[in-house]
């Protein structure tokens, strides 16, 4: 990675998807700047995973932005609502409490999360003069999340180009979603092909007190299913 | 304000523009929920002004979200760059340090600030099931800020309707910018007409240690010019 490589901001949670996305961005020869969020998530151990991943991949910089998504409540990932366990995948719609949101979004949905995350990525990109932003969203596994769909990403990109001087001056900002059409198994195979060590990654929404994954939340189940479908053993639980 | 009034999220900094915007939203009969940000701004006394304004206007709730815009640097409002003083208005372009941003944005521009603020407003709106978001942006006085232009706001609105279940289900989310075409003097006159007490508001980017406005930053100069043009005395400095 040299100083002349184009810069990219990569959203990095430390899970399988964002780690694979970082591997893809690096494979494209980009100078990667990782961005993570400390949003008082139940699964804060993922921030340690993100730091380890960022270090292993030799990113130029890794910023962790503290934000307060709990200020609004409304999600099992940041609130005192129980994380659902052992339910069939793909996640069935789970009603949120009256007035707390719409009926068909999984309870683990954090309101406007990708919009907030991408907005911070845009701020970071603007400071860096980087025109490429990578996010590991996936339209297949999480079809209940409206902000994982290609049309949403496209609309964000259009907005980003109007929001910033870079965009206004014709330096086109691109939001890259290399995983958007892949299944979890395909994502894992892609990452393995790029040399990703998935033992560094962490996926659980509701880890045990000793930080071991619970093995029963949607994210654990999806991860296990992904490795099973890929015909591989998960190195994090092996 | 009754329970049946439609809900609106109003971005409230405690300055003239956002306070006038809140007055307009309330005048339209909306049940207002105010949202402010603690972003380690130099001018944190504005948060006290926001709290006083919110209380005076009888908002249903006032949330203050702590966010860390300093994580990226790049602006005189959050960084250790000096706030420019006594320069001619409207703010001329001031070059940012090489690699820190584009040349024509005022140094007081915070990267992607309105995008970040509107993203949090969208999250709050989603939790409240509110379809109306008010922001006091102004295309006239701050023409150097790309995220104060109508085409940017429109693009954010389009994105917001794709980002959320509300939008996807046909409950159209609207970003209201009632001040977008008004001069500061027109904004003040509009607010006075709605009974706004501007002594509650605070505008300075770089207040004195005793929290008095400096009187010399862009924001102080713009405020003074606005009152002068409106033929009124600023009650905050009278």
Image (cartoon, coloured by chain):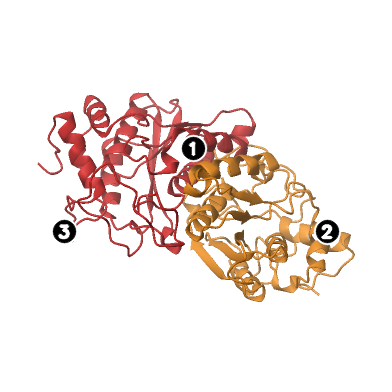
Chain colours: A orange, B red
In this picture, residue A85 sits left or right of residue B129? right
Which residue bears the numbered disc 1? B152
Q: Is residue A198 above or below residue B14?
A: below
Are the numbered discs 1 and 3 placed on the same chain, yes or no? Answer: yes
Q: Residue A219: x, y in percent?
A: 72, 58
Q: Give the chain of mark 1.
A: B
Q: Nearer the viewer, residue A91 or A134?
A: A134
Q: Which residue is mark 2?
A: A185
Real-space CA distance between mark 1 and mark 2, rounded to the nearest whole angstrom: 38 Å
Q: Nearer the viewer, residue B2 or B230?
A: B230
Which numbered mark, 1 or 2, is in the foreground of this view? 1
Q: Quadrant of residue B35?
A: top left
In the image: residue B99, left or right of residue B235: right
Q: Residues within 10 Å of mark 1 (few under 14, many from 20)?
A: many
Residue A53 position, x and y percent, is 65, 71
In the displayed structure, A21 sits above or below A51; it is above
Q: Is residue B149 above or below residue B6?
A: below
Locate residue B94 relative to residue A198 in the image: left or right: left
Q: Which residue is mark 3?
A: B210
Place of residue B112 in the rendered image (x, y in percent of width and height, measured from the top left): 46, 50
- Lower position in the chain sequence, tag 1 or tag 3: 1
């Amino acid at each position: 990675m040299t100083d002349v490589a184009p810069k990219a901001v990569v959203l990095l949670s430390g899970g399988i998807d964002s780690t694979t996305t970082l591997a893809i961005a690096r494979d494209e020869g980009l100078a990667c700047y990782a961005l993570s969020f400390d949003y008082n998530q139940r699964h804060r151990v993922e921030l340690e995973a993100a730091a380890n991943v960022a270090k292993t991949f030799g990113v130029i910089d890794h910023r962790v932005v503290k934000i307060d998504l709990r200020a609004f409540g409304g999600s099992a990932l940041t609130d005192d609502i129980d994380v659902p366990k052992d339910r069939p995948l793909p996640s069935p719609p789970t009603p949120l409490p009256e007035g707390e949101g719409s009926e068909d979004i999984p309870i683990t949905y954090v309101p406007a999360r990708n919009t907030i995350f991408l907005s911070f990525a845009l701020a970071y990109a603007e400071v860096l003069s980087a025109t490429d932003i990578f996010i590991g969203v996936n339209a297949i596994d999480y079809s209940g999340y409206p902000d994982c769909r290609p049309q949403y990403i496209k609309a964000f990109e259009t907005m980003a180009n109007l929001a910033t001087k870079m965009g206004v001056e014709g330096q086109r900002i691109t939001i890259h979603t290399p995983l958007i059409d892949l299944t979890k198994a395909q994502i894992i195979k892609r990452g393995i092909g790029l040399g990703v060590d998935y033992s560094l990654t962490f996926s659980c929404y509701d880890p045990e007190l000793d930080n071991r994954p619970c093995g029963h939340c949607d994210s654990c189940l999806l991860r296990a299913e992904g490795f099973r479908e890929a015909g591989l053993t998960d190195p994090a639980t092996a």
